Amino acid sequence: MQNQKVGLKRNKLNIGMIYFMYIKNIKIIVILIFLILIIYFSKENNFIKNTLYSALNNLSFEKSISKKYSPPISEGYDDIIFHFIDVGNGDSSLIQTEGYNVLIDTGEDMYSDKLLEYLSEFNVDKIDLFILTHPHSDHMDGLDEILDNIYVKKIVLPDIEIDRKIIKDYIDSYNSVRDNKVIIEYVKKDDRFILGNSFIKIISPSPKKYTKVNNMSIVLMYSYKEISIFYASDMEKELEIDISNSNSNIKSDILKVPHHGSITSSTKSILDNIMADIYIISVGKENKYNHPSIDILDRIRRYSKQVYRTDFNGNIIITSDGIKKVVHTSR
């Protein structure tokens, strides 16, 4: 009789646990449905929708591969490390592979100390390629601080005639008081840089002249083994369509989303050609441009739930062995 009572208690306990888990799962599903409905039916408040997108990203199944990082990287793979550095509503990325350091853009000058601190944290004492995608302050205003504090072997620039002389005069002035001379290289479509077993291919600028400086940006692909990443800089619709129609193979695992998620970019044609698994948006909190555009977020999330943003996720790092990849965030 006593055993029967114990058995009944256990059965009730098991039923209670099952019921509790059922109710808990139902609550999660209801919350997700509620968030989705708000996102798709509320079109007016950009900040609220952006916040809800972040909540959905944190609840997504893909989040299970995302890890907090603590330099140096102690989890994941470290053959190749992609850094997307939080410099507000600007751009700065770092590639580390086989002893090479490639810095792409710097953000505004006001973020220079933060950028230098970050680079020091990851033991960057030299920069093999310092790529400045185009002459806008949110991409290259920290040039002088980098040159003053880190040994730079080569600066890579787009050949934009209106700005070429200004930058060249600055570098010549810098070189005149330095023993180590910085080399300047102007690049064009299909140029390549070999970095051990990996390489960078320049997708743009092309000989075509565009009215907007953004469309004369350096756009590039980095490839290592089976992994590729597309750095789109600030390219806009006209350039995106030209690249899409060029029959170039630009399929990539990771897309550095163009122009901070602006409505002027990320056309369906370019996204269809890249077909990335992971999307990174470099953007500042509550910026005056309302980046990223809600319409662009809607469009990107049709391709993948793995959308990371520096305003919500802080510094973003992707480590890889050339095949698998792990996302690390600082928040």
Image: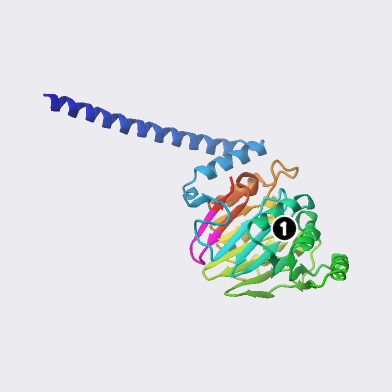
Residue plotted at (76% across, 59% down): 214
Relative height, residue 322 to residue 16 (above, below) = below
Side of 196 relative to 30 (left or right): right
* The quarter of the displayed image where residue 105 is located: bottom right
Region of the chain picked out in magenta, as a range? 319-327
Q: Report the amino acid beneath label 1.
A: Asp
Residue plotted at (51% across, 34% down): 34
Side of 14 relative to 74 (left or right): left
Quadrant the N terminus occupies? top left
Q: Is residue 159 visible?
A: yes
Whether residue 8 appears in magenta in the rendering, the answer is no
Q: Dot 1 corresponds to which residue?
A: 234
Question: x, y percentage for residue 103?
Answer: 69, 63
Other residues around mark 1 within 10 Å, as few (<14) / some (14–19) / many (≥20): many
Residue plotted at (51% across, 65% down): 321
User: In the image as oriented, which residue stretches furthest toward the left?
Assistant: 1
Side of 92 relative to 31 (left or right): right
Question: x, y percentage for residue 258?
Answer: 67, 56
Give the mark count: 1
Q: Is residue 272 visible?
A: no
Relative height, residue 93 to residue 5 (above, below) = below
Relative height, residue 89 to residue 269 (above, below) = above
Whether residue 326 appears in magenta in the rendering, the answer is yes
Question: x, y percentage for residue 22?
Answer: 36, 34
Residue plotted at (62% across, 71% down): 248
Side of 215 relative to 13 (left or right): right
Tell me the colour scheme of the image: rainbow
State the SS at label 1.
loop
Quadrant the C terminus occupies? top right
Question: x, y percentage for residue 116?
Answer: 72, 56
